[in-house]
Amino acid sequence: MKVITRFAPSPTGYLHIGGVRTALFNYVFAKKFKGTFLVRIEDTDKERSKPEYIEAIMEGLDWLGLNSDQKPIKQSERFDVYKEEAFKLVKADKAYEDDGAIRLKINKDGSTLVKDLVYGDIEFPNKELDDLVILRSDESPTYHFCNVIDDNYQNVTHIIRGEDHLPNTPKQIQIVNALGYKGFEYVHLPLVLGEDRKRLSKRHAATDLMSYRQEGYLPEALLNMLAKLGWSNTTEDIFDLEKLIEIFEVQDIQKAGAVFDIERLNFVNQAHIANMKIDFLKQELDSFNKKNGFSLDDHHDGEYLLELCKGSANNLSEISLFIKPFLLDFDDYNSEDFDKHLKNSEAVIDYFKNNLNKLETWTEESIEKVIEAAKNDLSLPMPKIGLPLRVALLGRAKSPQLNSTIYLIEKEKVIERLSKALEIITEH
C-alpha cells in the first residue's frame, strides 16, 4: 500500500503554528514510507475564505519546504461532485431531504469504533450522533461530507490531524460507510498548548507562521522545534528535516498536550544559526539589514563581523540590530550601561582616543597591543577598560572581545565616537 497523506487547511485565516505542526507530521509520515504528501484547500466557507489566505498558506508551506507532491485541489471547485454524491445517498435511502437540506440517516443502535494509531480504539455510542446535514439548503456541502469524499477521491491512506478532530471521526466514519468507501487509518495529534497548558492562542505567543519568518526565525528551526511537540524518540535537540524523516515513528507520538515554549524555539533557532555557513547566513540576513539601513557588503570585514556576532541574539532580526552600530551611528547610550561603566571613565576613553589614533595599521593585533599597554599604564583590570570602551563605541556593554570590537569599527569612526563620549562625560 502506498502511503498518501494530506494537509487540508481552511483559508479563513493565516497558517498558524498548530497547523504547521499538522502539516509537518503529514509530510514526514508520507516521506518516511516514500509516499505522497498532498495539500487540499478546504474553502467551502464562501464568506470567510479569502484568496490572500490561500496565497499566504501556500507561501508559508513553500518557505518551510513542505511542498505538495501534486497540484492542490480546492473544494470550492468541486461542489457539483458533492451535490451528486448527496443525491445518490437520497436515492439509495441512506439520506433524506429536510427543509431544503439533505441529512444522512444514522442508525442509532450500537456504536462506531474509531481505531486511532495514537489514542487506540475508542467507541462512540451512535445514539449520541444526530442525523448529519451533508448538503445545506443553499446546496453547499458540509465539512464532514466533502472531507470524506475528497480523502477517498485522492486515495488518502492516513488522516493525520489534531486531537480536536477526534469527536468528528465517528460522524465521518458514518459517511464513509454510507458511501461504500473502504475507509482510512487515523492518527490524532496532541494539541499545541500555551505555557498555562491551555490551547495556544495569541495571548501566549504569535500564532501566525509568517510572523516568525518576519522576526527572523529559520524554517528548519521552526520545524525542528514543532517536531518535538508531542513526539519524541531522540535525545537530540537539534536535527533537520531529513533526520526527522529517518527517525520518525507514529508510536512515538504522545497523547498529552504539548507546550509551545518561545524560549525553547529561541534555543533551537540559535543552534541552527550557529550551524549555518557564513555566506548563506549573510544572504539570509540581507533583508533584515536592508530594513535597518545598512549592508554587510559596505563593511571592511563583513563576514568576520557576522561570524563574531551571530551567537549574540535569538533570531535574524535581533542579530541585525546587534550588528547595526558597527556600521551606523547609534542615537543614545543604554542609560544603565552609561551610568555603570562610562560616566566615570574619562581617563580610559582619553587614553584610547590618543593611542588608537596613532596606529598606522588597523588590525586586531595592533589594537591588542594598545589594550595590553593600557592595562599597565592605567593600572586597571580588563573589565574597567573593556566595558567603558564598548559603551562608548556601541552604546551598550555587550559585544565580541575588545580588540575585535574596535577593529570591526572603522578607525575614523572609533576616534569620532570616543571624542563624542568624552564630550558627554564632561557634560555629566
Image: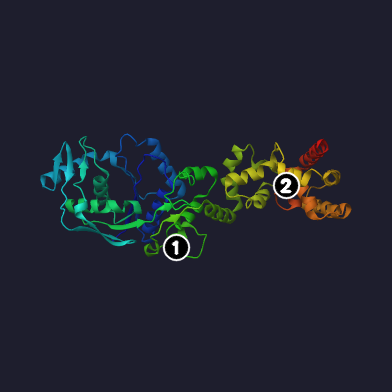
Residue 329 in picture, x, y percent from top left = 71, 37
27 horizontally vs 96: left or right: right
- Comparing 359 with 227, the one in front is 227
Asked whether residue 395 is in view, the answer is no
Q: Amino acid at mark 1?
A: Ser
Residue highlighted by disc 1: 232
Q: Who's the residue at 62% across and 46% down the image? A: 319
Residue 115 position (above or below residue 214):
below
Q: Earlier in the sequence, mark 2 or mark 1?
A: 1
Q: Who's the residue at 27% across and 44% down the image? A: 143
Residue 29 in picture, x, y percent from top left = 37, 58
* Number of marks in picture: 2
Identify the disc placed on residue 412.
none
Given this view, does label 2 or label 1 mark the residue nearer the observer? 1
Task: Tell me the SS state at disc 2.
Answer: loop
Mark 1: give few (<14), some (14-19) or many (20+) Cα within 10 Å.
some
Mark 2: give few (<14), some (14-19) or many (20+) Cα within 10 Å.
many
92 horizontally vs 402: left or right: left
Task: Tell me the SS state at disc 1.
Answer: loop
Residue 230 in picture, x, y percent from top left = 42, 58
Look at the image and tell me in which quarter the N terminus lies: bottom left
Q: Amino acid at mark 2?
A: Leu
Residue highlighted by disc 2: 408
Q: Who's the residue at 40% across and 59% down the image? A: 256
CA gap, disc 2 to disc 1? 43 Å
329 horizontally vs 15: left or right: right
